[in-house]
Image (tube, grey):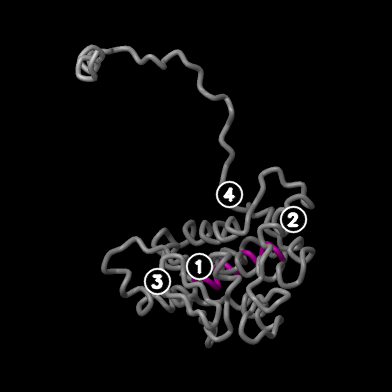
Amino acid sequence: MTSANTSAKYSGVKVNPCSKVDRNPTKTAKSERSLSDSEIPKFWTAFDQVGLVEGLALKTILLTGQRPGEIAHMRTEHIEDGWWTLPGAPVAKLNWPGTKNAQTHRVWLPKAAQQIIEELNSTGMVFAGLRGGAITGLDKAMRTICKQLGVEEKATPHDLRRTHSSAVAKLFGRDAMNRITNHKEGGIGDIYDAAEYSDENKKIMEAVANKFMSLIDGSADNVIHHQFDKAQ
């Protein structure tokens, strides 16, 4: 029978031949998550148990919401007056890989993150590994932390970024989240973001960092809400 005849023969099939086939009962594992408010202080404390540089890098991911790979390659040459400029294109001589979307990004480093950078007192690579290159092993560090905390739903370095992003979106909206995380959705508005939203982005970054630090320090909820209201 030719393929044409075959198509003609089955073109009028009205019953799904797979309708009685059982679905795979195995549930797909969740590939992403955010830390809850109650988890943030626990993880923050545990960051101190996986190595100085690794722990501070993980803290900085949570405080800034930037990509783990970009945090790992942070350079002091790109930080000025509290602003971190992430060149979109790779800079080979600085071992800077470029941003994921190849778009230059400028992000305010909240005071808590600036204190971390000052603590390291680095020149060049902020979070340097044993050989002076970008720190590695952040995924392994998070797996160790999850095991120590007995966390059933594992968390990754990228989930720290997602935790920050979720806080921004919840409090300031999706557009603010896209600006802070360097998610470009296209349109003429993208061109003006860096120039027109600096003050607002700075307030957003400080507000979210203040929220996290309030949770970590055990401050009252009304202090957190005051910070958000002030930022807006």
Mark nearer the N terminus (1 vs 2): 2
Residue identified by numbered label 3: 103
Residue 85 within the magenta-colored segment of the rendering: no
* Gap between marks 3 and 2 measured at Cα: 33 Å
- Main SS category, magenta section: helix
Residue identified by numbered label 1: 229
Q: Residue at x 51, y 77 (%)?
A: 108
Q: Amino acid at mark 3?
A: Gln
Instruction: Rate crowding at label 2 as few (under 14), some (14 to 19) or many (20 or more) other CA atoms within 10 Å.
Output: many
- Using the image, tell me which numbered label, if any, was put on residue 33: 4
Q: Position of residue 221 (x, y in %)?
A: 63, 60
Per the image, label 4 sits on a secondary structure element best described as loop
The quadrant of the picture occupied by the N terminus is top left
Quadrant position of residue 95: bottom right
First to last magenta residue range: 204-216
- Mark closer to the observer (3, 1): 3
Q: Is residue 13 above or below residue 26?
A: above
- Using the image, tell me which numbered label, if any, was put on residue 145: 2
Quadrant position of residue 112: bottom right
Left or right of 57, for residue 185: left
Q: Amino acid at mark 4?
A: Arg
- CB under 8 Å between discs 1 and 2: no
Per the image, label 3 sits on a secondary structure element best described as loop
Mark nearer the N terminus (3 vs 4): 4
Q: Amino acid at mark 2?
A: Ile
* Gap between marks 3 and 4 measured at Cα: 26 Å
Q: Residue at x 66, y 58 (%)?
A: 139
